[in-house]
Amino acid sequence: MVAFHEAVGASLGVTAVDQRALAVIMGAGSVSAGELAREIGLTPGAVTGVVDRLVRAGLARREPDLEDRRRLVITAVPGAFGDTFAGLAKAMAELTDRYTPAEQAVIADWVANTIGVLREQTRILTEG
Amino acid sequence: MVAFHEAVGASLGVTAVDQRALAVIMGAGSVSAGELAREIGLTPGAVTGVVDRLVRAGLARREPDLEDRRRLVITAVPGAFGDTFAGLAKAMAELTDRYTPAEQAVIADWVANTIGVLREQTRILTEG
DNA sequence: CAATTTAGTTCAGCATACTGAAATATCCAT
DNA sequence: ATGGATATTTCAGTATGCTGAACTAAATTG
């Protein structure tokens, strides 16, 4: 999985950090540069570069915030992520089809729990 | 998962590439520096740095090859990996226990297949 | 046993991305 | 209105890790 992400990054010209930033953006719908900086643990200066690379790769958009014109609204470009991961999505869909609905439910449950475990363990490593 | 690996790397002072190298070493049992270079796609010069960092982190050992004294035998330090991932291993074991043996079989099958899909997609991205 | 090949390290040069600080623009409180 | 706070960018300095080439040591070939 890590190797796959590195390959994606290399082919798009974005770093691992950039991809995590994109995940944050997609998870939140949209974020400001400052929020993104706090979320991924970088300085505001570095976030400019992160967003630059995501925009250059066609994965994100930088738009002015109409309510607070100091801010940016950073959003993911709909579909761009899907295009990049189209091969993976297709292969995974085919894989999913091989399982019964009951089995799919078990797998989905396990995946959700595993994500929780990884989040928690990451937190422990990072903070403690 | 990518975030977790980055956190592990940061706490041990090794890069993502180093961790992939360690996976190669553990998978093969032991490798020479040249084999490692080919496997992870780096020049021999860069591999010296990779192995330096893994050794410094206590994750790998560099030993002379008794049969060909130009070569190195690079091995993983037994247990070092386990120690680092002990928290994750424990949490994942607890998670696994929540499922019946039949469910565990389904999950294991899915995980194995998913690894295959990721390998294949990584190959496509890297080569094609 | 000399010449060539192979394994790994070292080192200079280069590219990349981060930090911290200064600059700019905008908002908000008085 | 005006002064201070906030959001983002820019830029110089720094750190890191890679490549490619030169170097050392050891194996292999003729």
Image: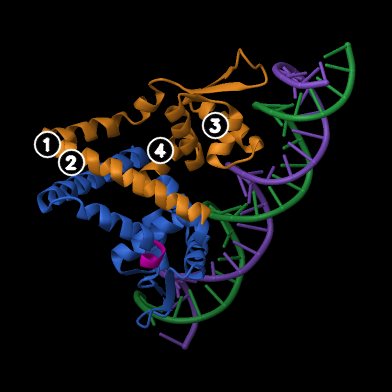
Chain colours: A orange, B blue, C purple, D green
> Chain under label 2?
A
Residue at mark 2: A106
Q: How many other residues sit within 10 Å of disc 3, few (<14), some (14-19) or many (≥20)? A: some
> Marks 2 and 3: in contact by CB < 8 Å?
no
| Residue positioned 42% across, 59% down in the render | B37
Task: Give SS at disc 2.
Answer: helix
Q: Position of residue A128 (x, y in %)?
A: 51, 57
Q: In the depicted view, which residue is nearer to us: A41 or B118?
A: A41
* Three-letter code, disc 4: Val
Q: Is residue D4 left or right of residue C7?
A: right
Q: Is A66 within the magenta?
A: no
Mark 4 vs mark 3, CA separation in Å: 13 Å
Which badge, 3 or 2, comes first in the chain's sequence?
3
> Chain under label 4?
A
> Chain under label 3?
A
Mark 1 vs mark 2, CA separation in Å: 7 Å
Task: Give SS at disc 3.
Answer: helix
Which badge, 1 or 3, comes first in the chain's sequence?
3
| Residue positioned 26% across, 58% down in the render | B93
Query: What is the span of residues highlighted in magenta in the rendered image?
Result: B81-85
* Three-letter code, disc 3: Arg
Residue at mark 4: A8
Mark 2 vs mark 4, CA separation in Å: 29 Å
* Three-letter code, disc 1: Ala
